[in-house]
Image (cartoon, rainbow, N blue to C red):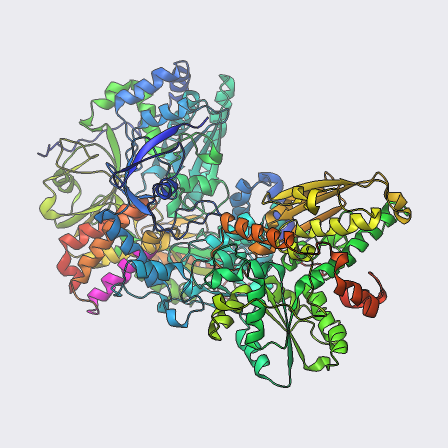
Amino acid sequence: MTKNIKITINGVSVEIEEGTTILDAARKAGVIIPTLCYHKDLCVAGNCRVCITEIVGQKRLTAACATPCEDGMEVLTNSLKVRNSRKHIVELLLSEHNADCTRCYKNGNCELQHLASEYKIMTQDFIRLAPMKKYTIDMFSPSIVKDDSKCVRCQRCVRTCVELQGVNALTVAHKGDQMKITTFFEKLISDVVCTTCGQCINHCPTGALVEKNYIEEVWDAIADTTKHVVVQTAPAVRVGLGEELGFETGTRVTGKMVAALKRLGFDAVMDTDFTADLTIMEEGTELLTRLKKVLVDHDPEVKLPMATSCSPGWIKYIEHMFPDYLEHLSTCKSPQQMFGALAKTYYAKARNLDPETIVSVSIMPCTAKKFEANRPEMHDSGYRDVDYVLTTRELAIMIKQAGIDFMKLEDMHYDRLMGESTGAGVIFGATGGVMEAALRTAYELVTGREVPFENLNIIPVRGMEGVKEATVKIENPLKEWAFLDGVELKCAVAHGLVNAGKVMESIRKGEANYHFIEFMACPGGCLGGGGQPIPTSPEIRQKRAEAIYAEDAGMPLRKSHQNQEIIKIYKDFLDHPLSEKSHHLLHTHYTARERF
Amino acid sequence: MTTNYQLRRVDFIFKNENDWEEVLSKSISRTPQELINELISSELKGRGGAGFPTGLKWKLSSEAVDDIKYVICNADEGEPGTFKDREILSRVPFKVLTAMAVCGHVIGAKEGYIYLRGEYFFLQPELKKAISEFEYFCKEINLDFKIRIFMGSGAYICGEETALFESMEGKRGEPRNKPPYPSSYGYMGKPTVINNVETLAHTFTIFKYGAKRFYDLGVQYSRGSKLFSVSGDTPKPGIYELELGMSLADFVDEFGDGDTKAVQVGGASGFLVPRKRFGETAIGFQGKLTGISLPTGGSMMLFNSSRSMFNVLDNYLEFFREESCGQCTPCRVGCQQLLKGIKAVKRGEKNAHYLDKLLRLTETMQLTAKCGLGQSVANSFSSIVENFREEMIY
Amino acid sequence: MHPVSELIKNLADQHGRERRNLLPILQGVVEQEKYLSEFSMIEIARELDLPAAEVYGTATFYSFLEYKKMGKYIIRVCKTITCSMKGKNQIMLAIEDMLKISAGETTPDGNFSLLQTNCLGFCHKAPAMLINNEIYTELTPEKVREILSSYLEKKGGLYDN
């Protein structure tokens, strides 16, 4: 039982539940207390001290994020004492920070910069400490650049890596003035157990952690008239991009995005949703094949549950943490890599292009996709399947650089051949989406009937719960799937690697008896990806998810196998799912990695 | 008004401990409430420096509801100029062990730990011997209480109680946010009493002789005696048990070398008192009646006129810069700024007014730092800079 | 099994494999090996099922848990106020002169490392130093030379093994 208590904030009375922090109470009362180390996704640290407030009667100031209210408390958030101290703290942070703002990638979207501007820190009275320290910049990862000189030691990245992702690539080391955020033995990010998911980037308030950007490379390719530059856009990009360009969170900007990409000068604008649908065909068939091999043939070589393989952060996670479970992974490449392999084969042939001249670019909500595109095995087209991966944020930068008034753009359609999408492809962007899409197709394939859910909406796999479960009972299957009659297909969905870890542990312990599991590295799935607009929070991810499902609901086709271009590619090029050709182009293998 | 008390030596702490078995048996036959009342009426305050009333601390933990509770003896004696706890543990360990067991009886704890700083590794063999003898006796009288030693590894901040818990839990010794306080959420999230070595030794005295013997010593708000670690420019460095409340002038008469320029009361995190204020300064906890009254964990460092106060401050700040845990901004960056700042003033790279900016910075550190370390840097900084400003400048 | 792995396994058997047993295990390795190598930390992480980065982050917080290779005898000279006032620098010079190393270095034969440390708690007998866990107080340059000579004799000469 919680009881309500009353406090005053700056003289205004507010009633809150017992246990509420001063920070939350203030927000309720409409008072903004600035924060830095605080993040809604993470546990409270209380270490930056920016949110200090005065409690009348107490000598010392107190951190609003870490202090629960007590009945009758009188809180001041803007007393002279608070103001002066807060200003000092911002000045101290700046003195330790390489405040070279004009040359910073995060210029304009930096919480420290924002604080400095709010408090009008115009002078540099304190001694600049940043130049005296031996800071390192690690830019050897294909995904993440870590610049210690910009770090304010708020530890948001560490808490993200530990609490949300359970990866622990980052840690706090040393103490005193030497204290810093680093990796095991201060190795390069590319040399430690890092999944490159980029959640640290999404939670970093400054420019200490940013994506490795390939904007200039893509501009160069566009400008090169000898190159044919194709671009694909991931499902989650269309519900995030608008945030960077003046739209409200949760606005769908699919048509405007396509128009903008055309204006940027890409030769063909196509959709990763197409290969998401293709993934469903391949992965769904793979699942049914596995089920048959296990249930009918009792083949000990074939492993269940089968785990999805679309999320490259998840892939790298399982390679490090559960290397003995790699055979559980679907062999399907991610939609991005399927697209890449087809762009330089199927598309090149159809458009009569020399694959050598094709530059394949992808726009992803993800930083791990940069790593994935770099994997040595991703050359099945005979070339590098995907040349450059840009995040949603990088695309927004390009649109701004090109002087495009995004708001005023007329909607446009994707180019054909690999540009058609169904609602099933779209929901890949949300946690549970791959599962839902797969079930929509697999169930129908097996029974000849639609999945028994109203409007095809498989609600149990939707939502932001860390681990979701669903069971689909198969009844009266078609003749060739008779062995599945009465089988209860047990499915699970996990997002955020810490949840993925929990599911994997339960499998290891033999407690779980799932057939099929969808894993996504990032909280909320791709829509909460490490390449999506900053900031992120549970509310923001919720809005993006609503947008995704609205997009799905509005599509004329909502099942992958209905996609006309999918039907065409099997007819003209791939023959059938799991054909030799698709094995060659669309499937892959994995690498066991060290856990420590 | 300052109450000048004569310097009076006392001999309780190091007096023989041969009767510990009797004190233990007698104490645990009393009810927790009786023992708490005894402690409360003695007005014993924590001897680590912060001065929290010990009786209240035990009371709060005894009221916490939990099957598992802990008693922890804080022997992470790291304050520069303090060395009394080591002497207690090596000369009268049974007093401390007894007090821990009594505390266990009071709050309902069956496990105790001594967090011993890494620098005192050499104390371990003897202390372990004492513990096994002690536990043997506990078994004989059917008292279920175990004591273990937990070694620190060289981190001053682990003397801060919540940092100490973190350290014992196998983590970086970073202080926690408070509340919750140790009495409800301490080691492993369980209700915990954590007392300084000397505090525990005093409770032995109180349980043995009764609260009155202790209460009769000292002055109002600062009852009892206290061990002082005397070092620096003194002909007789060492450990002395003295009544609380004496004036610093008397202290310097006794321990100075005739040329004492200033005394640092309470170690690097305490205050520096210049000669002109010796007379008006008393040693004890802040009270309503006394004038300037300085608390101390027992560190008394004397400086004679050959010492440069700049160098002294420089040494302290370097200490804090290294020993700050580094998590909170005011302490981590503040310590660096103070150290770099006084050097810059000394070299003439910043003008003398910069010292005022630094003084304001120490106020902010005092107001906003997460724990006692960052909050108390202001003490020595402001007392040195304000009293010896000219030495800082040229 | 590698001797360090065996040591770590034994320490874990002795202390337990929970997170709260981490410090005693780190200390146990340092006592034997004088420092925590990358290999030791990984082995500890494996044994306790902890992320290696956590082990590193925790170990580097504590100044007595060295993570760079150290000599057989680690000399830690106290540099805090009283020792500093009472001639710490002269003690450092005497040691540096005798061992031909500066603070932070290890003799080429791997016998001695010289470090400075914060308050050892022997201010009344300053200056003070620790050699491994042995305490030496009221030092003078002469006394330091004698102490080191006794260690060198134990070793049979400075650059012998």
Q: In the image shown, does B90 or A484 lie closer to the viewer?
A: A484
**Left or right, residue C53 beside residue B17:** right
Whole-percent x, y for residue B77 in the image = 36, 42
Quarter containing the C terminus of chain A: bottom right
Whole-percent x, y for residue B173 in the image = 43, 46
Q: Which residues are magenta?
A: B333-349
Q: Is residue A448 above or below residue A392?
A: above
Residue at far bottom of view: A226
**Left or right, residue B358 beside residue B16:** left
The reply to whether residue A142 is in sight is: no
Residue at 79% across / 47% down in the picture?
Answer: A443
**Left or right, residue A566 beside residue C29:** right
Whole-percent x, y for residue A391 in the image = 56, 65
Residue at 24% across / 52% down in the picture?
Answer: A84
Q: Does the magenta portion include B344?
A: yes
Q: In the image shown, does B352 or A400 lie closer to the viewer?
A: A400
Q: In the image shown, does A250 or A18 lie closer to the viewer?
A: A250
Q: Does the magenta portion include A242?
A: no
Residue B176 lies in quadrant:
top left
Whole-percent x, y for residue C48 in the image = 60, 45
Count the numbered circles shown.
0
The reply to whether residue A214 is in sight is: yes
Q: In the image shown, does B177 or C9 lie closer to the viewer?
A: B177
Main SS of the magenta segment?
A: helix
Q: Is residue A350 above or below residue A45?
A: below
